[in-house]
Image (spheres, helix red, strand yellow):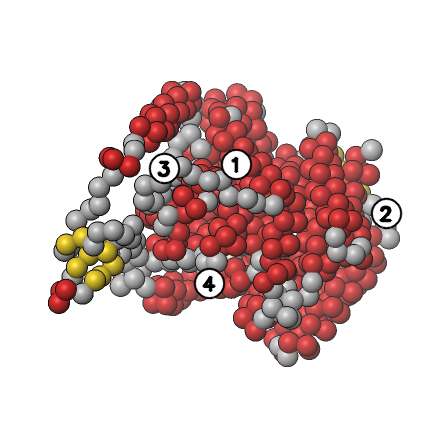
């Protein structure tokens, strides 16, 4: 039964996507997309209840993997020719040569067919893809209806969009479940191809340019993945060409190549530009590929390998790269007024924090990384969907244009505030995770400073945004906005997930994350006590305090009438008979008062910080190679 379930997790989304593509636009297509989302959620949850399982195919899997990779490489090569990118073409040919060489030179025992692993770590990622990813797919039904009316003439249409979007869930599940490095590489490249097509969906010049950049950087990472598979499969140390087979210091070279691939996929410095450019894509793409799932692939890869290499010197460098990325991107987010760009920098930073925790290599740090991975997917997926809804309603994604939306879009704004609060206040999981990360980095002063700095800047830019969307003049009543059912249901589901995970933070910590970390480091049950003692507070007083504060706020708000409202002093005589903030300024000219948010552009200059931080990150990668050479 379990082999069938694992196969369905990969194949079913592709089948559903194909149906959505070929069916005519209308109720039939929407029905297929909605059913695929519900089916994948149910399948993912049911599979997770089956426990750990290993699924190995026959000897035909080796030749089949070579054929599949050749097919994907042919597609990417065709794209390289079309977009006139010789670097992509050269890297694709290089990957194909490496794949053929691996197939010919691999030592006996290196080809054991594809081995799918369903263990606690892959189960967490599979659930994230199947549940959060499917909710985002369902949201896309309503979003793309509106988007289609404003799409440029070059838009490829919704049929192909849903085929790739739904099919991506299958490719991502294959990546998470695959243990054989050759098949992992195939799914890795498939997700890169999906990303390229979805980023360039609208067909505009800027969309095509950013899609090309994403393909270039991720193809470079795929070369690292191919080299990792080749060096592991041909190593004469008993490795089997599997991810779990990379467990000894003799295989530190494959591990280094895997880290390089992970850095590119997770947009760690200096590879972050592709993820920033990807924000031009429709919101479901940003939420699915570039927040909740695909970018998690790199972090997952480092987490998968971290326990086996805990204590190695090169893992300290890996941790520093992640912590440095977290601090720098948090600083860059402070200066951004583009809401999607703030979410993008925040995503890159949190991925860096996961990498940093994995590099620290302790059960506590590993637990923190798992928590960030899960809670970030839910919260950031929700925020991306909310920003997409706001953008469609007000025609802008600029934070400065979001003043007053609490009145215009009360329901969406309230849900957005829930998502923002989940990133920075207790008892939401993201704050708890960062506390654990700081606790875990105490023994590493450099990382501790970077993590604390990044966390502080994170609080600053979230509070700025949270305050901006709450600014609204007095209104006697609020009218709820009308949203497509799919969009409304999706954001409500994720908001319930955010709140529910906060209420269940302690049970999740003690009964899910700690056991997974203990199992990864092969700890005995008796060693769990120190980890369980890290979070020992009681959640309910915090929850009760928040609920009482909200209740008092609402009661106070209901008592306010128009008689209580007075116009503020506006640097001159107020102009009467108008609801806008007008005053008589110099030379008796009527001037409108304007309030904006501080972005500290002179301090957090994006261009300057990006240039020097990319240089430092590049030097850190060279240091990583130097440490490996010494080893």
Give the Cα distance between marks 4 and 1. 33 Å
Find out whether the residues at labels 1 and 3 contact each other: C-beta distance under 8 Å.
no
Of the two numbered discs 4 and 2 on the same chain, state the one appearing first in sequence.
2
The mark nearer the N terminus, 1 or 3, is 3
Q: Is there CB contact under 8 Å for labels 4 and 2?
A: no
- 10 Å crowding of disc 3: few (<14), some (14-19), many (20+): few
Q: Residues within 10 Å of mark 2 (few under 14, many from 20)?
A: few
Classify residue 54 as left or right of residue 223: right
Residue 19 percent coordinates (x, y): 80, 52
Residue beneath label 1, please?
A: 495
- Give the residue at mark 3: 476
Residue at (32% x, 44% y) in the render: 473
Secondary element at tag 4: loop
Residue 536 against residue 581 in the figure, above or below: above
Q: Nearer the viewer, mark 1 or mark 3?
A: 3
In this rendering, position of residue 196 left or right of residue 422: right
Q: Residue at x 64, y 79 (%)?
A: 84
Graded by Cα atoms within 10 Å as few (under 14), some (14 to 19) or many (20 or more), the crowding at tag 1 reads many
Q: Nearer the viewer, mark 2 or mark 3?
A: 3
The image position of residue 311, as x and y in percent, is 48, 43
Residue 414, by quadrant, is: top left
Q: Are the residues at dot 2 and dot 1 in contact (C-beta closer than 8 Å)?
A: no
Closer to the chain start, of discs 3 and 4, is: 4
Residue 270 marker = 4
Foreground pick, 62 / 197: 197
Is residue 422 at all visible to an observer of this figure?
yes
Which dot, 4 or 1, sits closer to the camera? 1
Q: Position of residue 242 (x, y in %)?
A: 70, 48
Q: CA distance from mark 2 to mark 3?
A: 70 Å
Local secondary structure at mark 2: loop
- Name the one closer to the observer, 573 or 275: 573
């Amino acid at each position: 039964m379990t082999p069938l379930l694992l196969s369905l997790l990969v194949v079913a989304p592709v089948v559903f996507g194909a149906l959505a593509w070929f069916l005519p636009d209308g109720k039939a297509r929407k029905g297929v997309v909605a059913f695929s989302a519900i089916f994948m959620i149910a399948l993912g949850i049911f599979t997770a209840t089956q426990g750990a399982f290993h699924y190995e195919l026959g000897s035909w899997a080796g030749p089949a993997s070579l054929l599949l990779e050749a097919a994907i490489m042919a597609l990417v090569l065709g794209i390289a020719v079309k977009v006139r990118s010789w670097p992509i073409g050269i890297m694709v040919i290089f990957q194909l040569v490496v794949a053929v060489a691996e197939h010919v030179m691999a030592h006996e025992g290196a080809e054991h067919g594809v081995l799918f692993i369903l263990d606690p770590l892959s189960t967490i990622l599979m659930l994230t893809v199947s549940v959060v990813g499917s909710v985002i797919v369902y949201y896309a039904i309503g979003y793309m209806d509106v988007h289609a009316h404003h799409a440029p003439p070059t838009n490829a249409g919704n049929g192909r969009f849903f085929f790739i979007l739904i099919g991506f869930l299958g490719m991502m599940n294959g990546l998470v479940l695959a243990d054989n490095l050759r098949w992992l590489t195939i799914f890795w490249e498939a997700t890169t191809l999906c990303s390229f097509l979805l980023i360039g969906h609208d067909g505009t010049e800027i969309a095509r340019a950013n899609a090309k950049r994403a393909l270039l950087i991720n193809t470079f990472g795929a070369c690292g993945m191919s080299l990792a598979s080749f060096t592991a499969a041909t190593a004469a140390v008993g490795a089997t060409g599997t991810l779990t087979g990379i467990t000894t210091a003799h295989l530190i070279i494959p591990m280094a190549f895997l880290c390089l691939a992970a850095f590119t996929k997770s947009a760690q410095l200096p590879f972050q530009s592709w993820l920033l450019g990807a924000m031009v894509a429709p919101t479901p793409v940003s939420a699915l590929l570039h927040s909740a799932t695909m970018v998690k692939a790199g972090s997952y890869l480092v987490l998968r390998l971290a326990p086996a290499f805990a204590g190695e010197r090169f893992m300290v460098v890996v941790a520093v790269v992640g912590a440095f990325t977290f601090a720098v991107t948090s600083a860059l987010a402070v200066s951004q007024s583009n809401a999607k760009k703030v979410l993008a920098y925040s995503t890159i930073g949190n991925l860096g924090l996961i990498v940093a925790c994995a590099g620290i290599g302790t059960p506590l740090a590993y637990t923190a990384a798992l928590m960030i991975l899960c809670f970030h997917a839910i919260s950031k997926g929700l925020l991306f969907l909310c920003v997409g809804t706001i953008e469609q309603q007000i025609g802008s994604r600029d934070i400065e244009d979001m003043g007053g939306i609490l009145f215009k879009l009360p329901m969406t704004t309230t849900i957005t505030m829930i998502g923002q609060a989940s990133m920075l206040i207790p008892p939401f999981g993201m704050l708890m995770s960062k506390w654990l990360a700081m606790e875990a980095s105490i023994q590493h002063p450099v990382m501790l400073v970077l993590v604390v700095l990044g966390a502080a800047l994170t609080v600053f830019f979230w509070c700025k945004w949270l305050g901006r969307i709450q600014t609204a003049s007095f209104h006697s009543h609020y009218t709820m906005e009308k949203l497509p059912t799919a969009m409304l249901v999706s954001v409500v589901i994720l908001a319930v997930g955010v709140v529910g995970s906060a209420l269940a933070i302690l049970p999740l910590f003690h009964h899910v994350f700690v056991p997974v970390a203990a199992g990864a480091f092969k700890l005995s049950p008796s060693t769990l006590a120190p980890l369980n003692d890290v979070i020992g507070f009681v959640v309910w007083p915090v929850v009760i305090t928040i609920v009482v504060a909200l209740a008092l706020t609402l009661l106070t708000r209901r008592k306010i009438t128009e008689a209580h409202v007075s116009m503020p002093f506006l640097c001159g005589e107020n102009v009467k008979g108008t609801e806008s903030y007008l005053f008589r300024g110099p030379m008796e000219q009527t001037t409108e008062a304007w309030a904006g948010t501080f972005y500290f552009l002179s301090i957090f200059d994006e261009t300057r910080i990006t240039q020097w931080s990319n240089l430092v990150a590049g030097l850190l990668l060279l240091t990583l190679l130097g440490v490996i050479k010494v080893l």
